[in-house]
Image: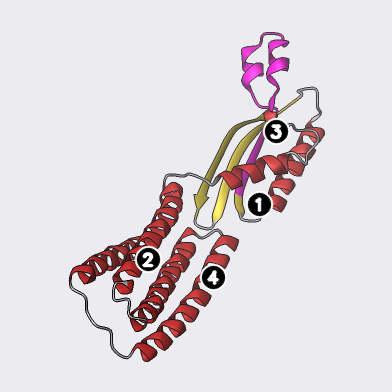
């Protein structure tokens, strides 16, 4: 919804800018207009920075989109300020020209925030999240990053649910296997504090399966 509002703002800004190229309109009270634009710019930018920062901390795509909406409002205020200065200097074309520049910036914001939201709707995750997962696993010496299989991640609200298999030697005892799984979970929580449900399973390494006795059921069953 917020992305749609920003997109609508971009369309209206583009229309008004093109309209003023063909039908210029004089601007009055330029001083008051500039002061109002500065106040609007500062206020919206403060709100935008706060919402985007908090949204990233709690991994809320909706709050980040709301922050981008405030950022868009701030850019509109900036456009008004530049327009007032340009018109005051005698450049009547400054108002519509700056409006088109702001339109391009708004469309970029729509693309970036919309891409994040729609990606999460399709159960997508950011590449940085996957890098953090592999980085966390790298802190467990008993598990190599290549030993990760069936990795599944999904955003549910502000929490990331994770499910994965780790390939271990079947010669490990039950206690050793449980200890490694616990270490993996702790490292994941340390590197990804926004994790919700974590499901880590241990399965035999492919090499040890091929060297087994041929019992198919034993080959595909998890260690724990």
Residue 98: percent from left, percent from top:
36, 69
Residue at coordinates 81% horizontally, 34% vertically from top-left? 176
Give the labeled residue for mark 4.
Answer: 49
Mark with earlier residue (3, 1): 3
Give the labeled residue for mark 1.
Answer: 192
Residue 175: percent from left, percent from top:
81, 35
Q: Is residue 215 magenta?
A: yes
Badge 2: how crowded within 10 Å, few (<14), some, or many (20+)? many
Task: Report the magenta residues as a range.
Answer: 197-224
Badge 3: how crowded within 10 Å, few (<14), some, or many (20+)? some
Residue at coordinates 29% horizontally, 76% vertically from top-left? 92
The residue lying toward the viewer, choosing from 206 and 40, is 40
Mark with earlier residue (4, 3): 4
Mark with earlier residue (2, 4): 4
The quarter of the rendered structure image containing the N terminus is: bottom left
The residue lying toward the viewer, choosing from 196 and 176, is 196
Left or right of residue 91, residue 205 in this image: right
Mark with earlier residue (4, 1): 4
Mark with earlier residue (1, 2): 2
Q: CA distance from mark 2 to mark 4?
A: 19 Å
Residue 13 drawn above or below residue 36: above
**Tags 4 and 3 in contact by the CB under 8 Å rule?**
no
Residue 154 drawn above or below residue 159: above
Residue at coordinates 55% horizontally, 72% vertically from top-left? 50
Badge 4: how crowded within 10 Å, few (<14), some, or many (20+)? some
Q: Is residue 179 visible?
A: yes
Give the labeled residue for mark 3.
Answer: 145
Q: Is residue 93 magenta?
A: no
Give the labeled residue for mark 2.
Answer: 102
* Residue that extends furthest to the front in the rendered view of this protein: 90
* Residue that extends furthest to the left in the rendered view of this protein: 23
């Amino acid at each position: 919804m917020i992305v749609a509002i920003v997109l609508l703002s971009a369309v209206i800004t583009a229309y008004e800018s093109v309209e003023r190229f063909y039908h210029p309109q004089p601007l009055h009270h330029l001083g008051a207009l500039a002061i109002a634009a500065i106040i609007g710019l500062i206020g919206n930018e403060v709100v935008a920075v706060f919402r985007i920062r908090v949204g990233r901390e709690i991994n809320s795509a909706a709050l980040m989109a709301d922050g981008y909406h405030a950022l868009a409002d701030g850019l509109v205020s900036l456009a008004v300020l530049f327009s007032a200065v340009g018109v005051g200097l005698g450049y009547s074309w400054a108002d519509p020209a700056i409006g088109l520049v702001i339109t391009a910036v708004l469309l970029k914001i729509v693309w970036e925030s919309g891409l994040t939201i729609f990606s999460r709707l399709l159960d997508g995750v950011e590449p940085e999240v996957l890098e953090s997962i592999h980085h966390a696993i790298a802190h467990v010496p008993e598990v190599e990053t290549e030993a990760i299989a069936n990795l599944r991640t999904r955003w549910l609200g502000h929490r990331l649910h994770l499910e994965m298999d780790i390939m271990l030697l079947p010669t490990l005892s039950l206690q050793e296997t449980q200890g490694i799984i616990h270490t993996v979970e702790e490292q994941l929580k340390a590197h990804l504090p926004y994790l919700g449900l974590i499901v880590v399973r241990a399965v035999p390494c492919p090499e040890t399966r091929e060297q087994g006795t041929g019992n198919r059921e034993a080959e595909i069953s998890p260690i724990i």
